[in-house]
Image: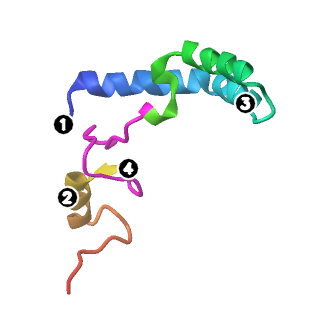
Amino acid sequence: MAKQNMIEREKKRNKLIQKYYRKRKEIKGTLNNNLTFIEQLEIQRELQKLPKNSTPCRRRNRCWKTGRSRGFYKDFGLSRHVLREMSHNCLLPGVRKASW
């Protein structure tokens, strides 16, 4: 189980990402190659004024059951430990134990 403060921090980041998504998209939409270098720098400064945690690349994938961030399977939204337990208990449809 992940620490509760890490899970709460991730929730806070997700709220910030949703809050500033449109503003960030509008600012990035104004960037293009036709602008002068100084204009591009001004637009970059506007982006830098936004909160650091509002950028989507700072989001961390976490298991929805335990909050674990490592060993995460994106298809299921689970960590490897929980995925293994649930597949052994036949709680995940279409998942079978491999044998070769």
Query: Which numbered disc, 4 or 3, marks the residue that appears first in the sequence?
Result: 3
Q: Residue flagged by tag 3: what amino acid is it?
A: Leu
Question: For the view shown, which residue lies furthest in the bottom direction?
Answer: 100
Q: Which residue is mark 4?
A: 77
Label 1 and label 4: CA atoms lie apart by: 15 Å
Where are the magenta residues, as a range? Answer: 58-76
Tag 1 and tag 4, C-beta contact below 8 Å = no
Measured from the top left, where is residue 69 in percent x and y? 28, 41
- Name above or below for residue 62 compared with residue 94: above
Q: Which residue is mark 1?
A: 1
Look at label 4 and name its amino acid.
Gly
The residue mark sitting in front, 3 or 2, is 3
> Relative to 77, does residue 58 appear above or below in the rendering?
above
Secondary structure state at the residue bearing disc 2: helix
Q: Determine the residue positioned at 27% across, 26% down.
A: 6
Residue indicated by mark 3: 31
Q: CA distance from mark 2 to mark 4?
A: 14 Å
Disc 4 versus disc 3: distance between alpha carbons?
Answer: 34 Å
Rendered residue at 64%/15% (across/down): 46
Badge 4 crowding class, 10 Å Cα cut-off, few under 14, some 14 to 19, many 20 or more, is some
**Camera-side residue: 47 or 67?**
47
Q: Is residue 67 magenta?
A: yes
Residue 51: where, in percent of width, then height? 50, 16
**Which numbered disc, 3 or 2, marks the residue that appears first in the sequence?**
3
Asked if the residue under mark 1 is in contact with the one under mark 2, i.e. CB atoms within 8 Å, the reply is no
The residue closer to the viewer here, 83 or 16, is 16
User: In the image, what residue type sits under mark 2?
Assistant: Glu
Q: Distance of mark 1 from mark 3, alpha carbons?
A: 42 Å
Q: Which quarter of the figure has residue 42?
A: top right
Which sits in the foreground, 76 or 41?
41
The span from disc 2 to disc 1 (Cα, nearest Å) is 15 Å
